[in-house]
Amino acid sequence: MAGSRHPDDLTFIRPDPKIHREAVFDLIAKVFAGREYWGMLAYCRNSYIDTSHYDWRGSTIGLLGDDVVTHWGVLGYRMRIGRARVRTAGVGVVATHGEHRRKGLMAATARAGCQAARAAGYDVSVLFGIPDFYHRFGYVRAWPERTYTVQADTLPPAPGPMTLRPFATRHRDDLATLYNRCNRRLTGTAVRPTFRVRTKGWEGYLWSAPDGRPAGYVIVTDRQGKRFELVEHAGDSAAVLAALGRLARKYRAREVRLYSLHHDSDLARTLRRGDCRVETHYLRSGEAMIRTLNLPATLRKMRGELAARLRRSHLADWRGEMLIADAREKVLLAIDRSRVAVRPAKRTKHAIRGGDEIAQLLIGTGAPRETVAAGTIRLTGDAKRLVDVLFPDQHPSLAAWDHF
C-alpha cells in the first residue's frame, strides 16, 4: 500500500515486520497491558501475532515522523457463509499512542485500514469492538452474544467407554480437521487454522475413536466456585455432554456455561431439546460487528450458496436481474432458474438498496424482514420476495478460539 497523508502529518503505511515489528508490539503493550507490559509483549510474540494469522500486508500503521502512533491490525481468515467462504479481515489490537489520543488519528487510521484491507484482497471485515465507536466507519452488528447454561446434574453419562485425555491448547492438524468437519456449513465460523497457540489458561480434553484417532474434544476455562465454561468443542453432541458431565463431577461444579456456541450446531440443538437457559445480549454498536469491503467479490463467492437456497425454495424457477447496493458499491445478480451470476450494476426494477446494513443480510444476522425494517434498506419489485429466500437468518457466530 502506498503511503497516504493525514492533515495532521500522520502517514499511513503497511507495517514491515523487518522494520516495525518491535515498535508495533511496544505500542500494543503500552495500550492494552496496563501494568503487565512485558506479559503483553510475550503474548504478541508467542500467540497473538507471531504464531497466528496476523497479516502484515493487510494491516495499517500511522506514523508521525518515524514513530508508530496508531495501529489497525488485521488477522486474516476465511469465514463461512453456508457453503461459501469469504476472505475476512478480522480487526484486532486497534491502538493509539497515549500522547496522541483525542486528535482524530484513529478515525483516520480506521478509514485507511479498511481501504488497505480491500486492496489486500479482503471481502468483508469483522471486529469485536468497544461500544458506540466503530459504527462511524461502516460497521454494523454482526451477531448478538449468546450464552447457554445447563445444570451439571442434567448432563448425561457417557454412552459407552470414554477416556478423557488432556491436551495442550495449541493448533493440531487433526483437531482442526475435526473442527472444520463439524462446522462446515455454520455461518460466521472460521476455517481453521487460525491461531496456532491459545495461552488463556484453557484446559483441553479429548477422546478417541476405536482406531485411535480423535473423535471429539472440549476446551474449558474459568472454574469459578460451582461453575465452569465450555469455550470450544467438536464431536458428537452426546459425547460432548458426557465429557462435560465428567468434568463437572471432577470440578464439583453445579452448572456449566457454554460460551459462543453456534445456534445451529448439533450441540445447541441438543441442549434446546432438554433443559437449559439461553441468554442473548444485543448491542447496537459494539461487540461483534461487520462491514463489507468488496461487495462484488463477496457476492461472487456466495453464488453457489445463493443458487442452493433458490433451488430449495418456491422461487427456484425465477428469472431476472436484481440490483444489490450498499453504502459504497452496487452489483447485479443475474438469476436464471437457480443459476446465479454476478455482473456490473445497471438499472432494474428488482432491487435491494441500503447502507451498511447490507452486510447483515449477507451473513444472515437476523430475519431478513427485521433487518430491512430496522435499517435503511429499500426493496423494489421481486426483491420483496427474493430477500427471504436469498438471505435467511443464519444465526452467525465465531468460536471463542478464533476471537481476535
Image: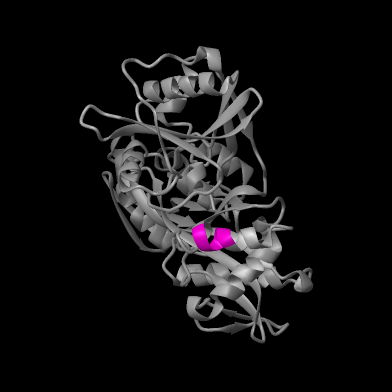
Range shown magenta: 42-46
Magenta stretch: helix, strand or loop mostly: helix
Q: Position of residue 331 (x, y in %)?
A: 42, 61
Number of numbered labels in the structure image: 0
Judge left or right: residue 250 versus residue 39: left
Q: Is residue 328 above or below residue 304?
A: below
Question: Can you name the residue that lies furthest to the left here?
Answer: 211
Query: Would residue 257 appear left or right of 233 to someone viewing this image?
Result: right
Q: Residue at x 56, y 58 (%)?
A: 43
The answer to if 103 sits in the magenta stretch is no
Q: Position of residue 148 (x, y in %)?
A: 56, 27
- The image quarter containing residue 327 is bottom right
Residue closest to the eye, 363 or 65:
65
Q: Is residue 354 above or below residue 217?
A: below
In this orientation, which residue lies closer to the viewer: 272 or 345?
272
In the shown orientation, is residue 205 left or right of residue 307? right
User: Is residue 375 something that shows in the picture?
Assistant: yes
Which one is nearer the viewer's eye here, 323 or 78? 78
> How was this image coloured?
one colour
Q: Identify which residue is drawn at 42% across, 54% down.
A: 196
Residue 393 in sight: no
Q: Is residue 181 above or below residue 150?
A: below
Q: Residue 346 location in percent, x, y?
A: 41, 63
Rendering coords of residue 42 (x, y %): 57, 61
